[in-house]
Amino acid sequence: MKAVLLDGFGGIEVLKVGEAARPVPAEGQVLVKVVATSINRPDLVQREGKYPPPPGDSEILGLEVSGTIEDLGPGVSGWQVGDRVMSLVGGGGYAEYAVAYASHLMRIPESMSFEEAACVCESYITAFLNVFMIGGLKDGNTTILHGGGGGVNTAALQLCKALVPATKMIVTAHPSKMERVKGLGADLVIDYTQTPDFSEVVKEFTGKKGVDVILDHVGAKYLAPNMNSLGYAGRLVIIGVISGIKAELNLALMMVKRQQIIGSVLRSRPVKDKGEIVAEFTRTALPKFADRTIVPIIEKVFTLDQVVDAHRMMEEDKHFGKIVLKIS
């Protein structure tokens, strides 16, 4: 099969389109004929040699796929060859065929294209898991969603607007993306280039109450302003550490305000856990995609042969929403 291969680890120059062996579905898996996948920031980190796939998963890049079922592995029921599906995968998305666990599959609603479906599993499930299942965001709460304009951030904004419409949303964003973030329903957008310590602005906006949930991928640099922005019993969910892994923490403040700091990753979770997360997302959020309340935001669709250009766009951080890679 045709696939994106790595000629060592490093920059975009290591990405090569070549031939790889077609995977064979194992117990509980299906073989998906991939129509589209998407570019996610962890793909870039893996390309650099800093984020290996979990044991047993494909070394090929790509954390989500949309396509049709080509073959069923042993023990799979409830699915048929030809079904339109989208799925999380531990790796292997940048290829003509990929294996996925049947418990991680979701049916693509008739109203959705394969390109739109390729955007759902990694970003929207990550946002849903961390904001709602872990962060416990309720309607009427206030949340900070960092990374305005990125895939997970735009997904979180759309999910909050659809599932908890009375929630107040604060977003930190680059000035070039602030207007589009506002257009997705953010109540307050903070220019992080001008206001690196956003906590005073947050306190003013919330009447000194602070916020209930923060979704953060920045890490060390934002730890202090995040904690200062949290209200009593607030939850900080950390899903990335792009600014570093070490920072000082005021434990006394954390104790007095009964705050929680929760670390979270999706890719390395056990198969069963991911299946339960997918099931909850399917029940709670997927109907909002079917009726077009939520429409995935696509910056651009690239072909497989344009994978270098797709990674370059992600690196330059000029996209808004998702970058899609069309496989077939």
Image: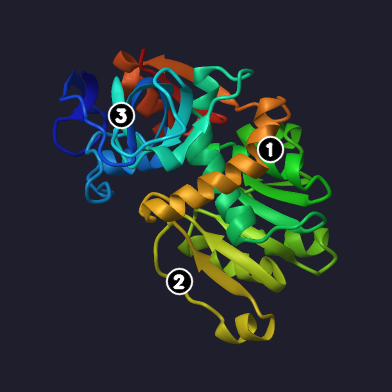
Residue drawn at (28%, 43%), measured in percent from left and top?
Answer: 46
From the viewer's perspective, tell me whether residue 286 is left or right of residue 5: right
Residue drawn at (39%, 20%), measured in percent from left and top?
Answer: 81
Q: Disc 1 or 2, which lies upstream in sequence?
A: 1
Amino acid type of the residue that numbered disc 3 sits on in the rendered structure: Ala
Q: CA distance from mark 3 to mark 1?
A: 28 Å
Q: Disc 3 or 1, which lies upstream in sequence?
A: 3
The image shows residue 272, relative to residue 2, as above or below, that is below
What kind of element bears circle 1?
A: helix
Amino acid type of the residue that numbered disc 1 sits on in the rendered structure: Gln
Q: CA distance from mark 3 to mark 2?
A: 39 Å
From the viewer's perspective, tell me whether residue 194 is left or right of residue 273: right
Residue 159, position in %: x, y?
A: 68, 41
Asked if the residue under mark 2 is in contact with the one under mark 1, i.e. CB atoms within 8 Å, the reply is: no
Q: Is residue 328 visible?
A: yes
Residue 303, position in %: x, y?
A: 37, 14
Query: Which residue has dot 1 on it?
Result: 158
* Mark toward the viewer: 1 or 2: 1
* Mark toward the viewer: 3 or 1: 3
- The image quadrant of residue 20 is top left
Query: Which residue has dot 2 on it?
Result: 247
Query: Which residue has dot 3 on it?
Result: 98
Residue drawn at (65%, 29%), measured in percent from left and top?
Answer: 289
